[in-house]
Image (tube, rainbow, N blue to C red):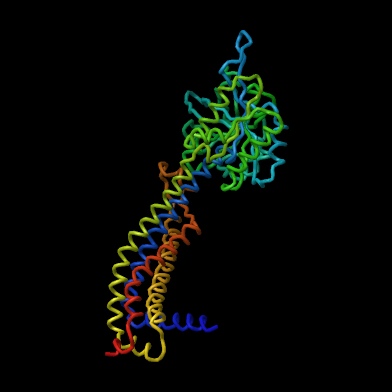
Amino acid sequence: MGKMSNMKTTVLLALKNLTRQKRRSLMLALAISFGFFIVTAIDGIASGAMKNLVEHIVQMQGGNVIVQGLIHQTGENGEIIKKYSFVIDEPEFLEETFLNTDIEYEAYACRTMTSGTIVFNGKKIDTNVFGCNYQKEKKLTDSFIALEGNIEDIYKPYSMVITKKSADSLNIKVGDKVLYITTTVDGQRTVGEFTISLIVKDDSIMNTIMIYVPIESLNELYKIKPNEYNQLSVFVENSKQNLYSQMIEDKIREAGKVVTSRKEAIKEDPTNIVGKIRKQAFNNLIPDTIYVVASLNDAVPVLGQIVSIVHSVTTMILIVIMLIVMVGISNTYRMIMYERIKEIGTMRAVGMTGKQTGKLFTTEAVILSLIGAIVGVIVALIFMTCVCSIQINFDAFSFFMKNNHLTYEISVGSMIGKYIIMILLTIIAVRGTSKSVSRLSPAQALR
């Protein structure tokens, strides 16, 4: 109880002392606020931009854990050759495998993904067309913002959902028929006719290459069975995607199927995991389906690295700003010590120990820093909210935006780390003054 009472008294005295020289305290707090405002704003907007980029990629892929089936073709003499195609010819086995894993998932998608050219009245665009099972992909259909057409028409055979930018570039409208030129699973050129059923809003350049059709229609064009597909995508919590990828891989291997090894790929080259995984599949010349399992982190490891770099850079900016502020804090509190020299002597004379007197100065500085940091974060939140409310119609940045708006994301862990750094630097800044105060005897101070 005595220690708690002493701490309370020290805090109350420190708060009272901070109000004695309001202008000086305000200037120091503003300097600290500015530092926290800068790093919070940079960190928050950069993290939000990276999150939006990841979401665009995940939406295009249908998830952040990807499973594909690769089948090598047979040459004229019956020998397995390095020519291959992507198709999952055991869809029931694969879905049952991942559904029996322990990690919860938000959604999954079984898609046939193709690349080709859409042609209409002499105009054409190169694009990706995704064959989707709309009944199972509620997350996808809920994301459609219809500009023209009826959402119910997307379920019709050979219907096509196209983005506004793609529709404008081809000068097409709902009801028009377009030709889609692509290749079959065996690499043969093929053409299909699709009817535009829905034109949807696109909020990034990436969305313009995302065109959807019923999976049965695309499978017929791709020359695979109606229930087959070439990619299973699972959307799980971002922090668990690597774990979930490994679990699915292990389950497939336990079932006696051939599957690539993430662990070997990581060991061989952690900067090009997907490249090494695909190399394993390409070089494994067997007649069976080879399952390829990878996470979004495996495919684009630089995304996680960029977020870490942003946190590191903003931390360094904070340290530099705080080092500059530390000089001001150190000089200010040395001056305060001389201003309060008789007051210190009086406090020592009535029973306050040298350690308690020194702690009072440290507590003042820490409280001042905390107030400044809190104000800086609040101002940064207001600033980021205002910036993110502005609509930005600039395609070059659309990858990093959501519905033509910037977004921000605050990392609690990063923020706590910055607060700890600030407190430690503040304590170091007043350490010399605190030691000098604690060594003063009542007689010296009063004299």
Residue 335 visible from this viewpoint: yes
Seen at 48% across and 28% down, the residue is: 125
Which is more toward the observer, 148 or 383?
383
Outermost residue to the top? 77
- Picture coordinates of residue 150, whole percent (x, y): 63, 40
> In the image, what residue occupies the spot 57% across and 48% down?
239
- Tally the numbered discs: 0
Where does the image place residue 306, in percent across and percent down from the top left? 44, 46
Is residue 189 among the parts visible in the rendering?
A: no
Residue 40 image offset from top left, x and y in percent: 42, 59
Decide which of 120, 373 is in the foreground and name it: 373
Residue at the far bottom in the pictured view: 350
Nearer to us in this view, 98 or 393:
98
| Figure quadrant of the N terminus | bottom right
Quarter of the rendering containing residue 396: top left
Q: Residue at x 42, y 74 (%)?
A: 367
Q: Is residue 177 left or right of residue 394?
A: right
In which quadrant will I find the C terminus? bottom left
Using the rendered view, name the quadrant where residue 282 is placed. top right
Q: Is residue 447 above or below residue 79?
A: below
Q: Is 328 left or right of 101, judged from the image as shown?
A: left
Q: Residue at image x 66%, y 46%?
A: 103
Q: Is residue 138 left or right of residue 25?
A: right
Closer to the camera in the image, 374 or 399: 374
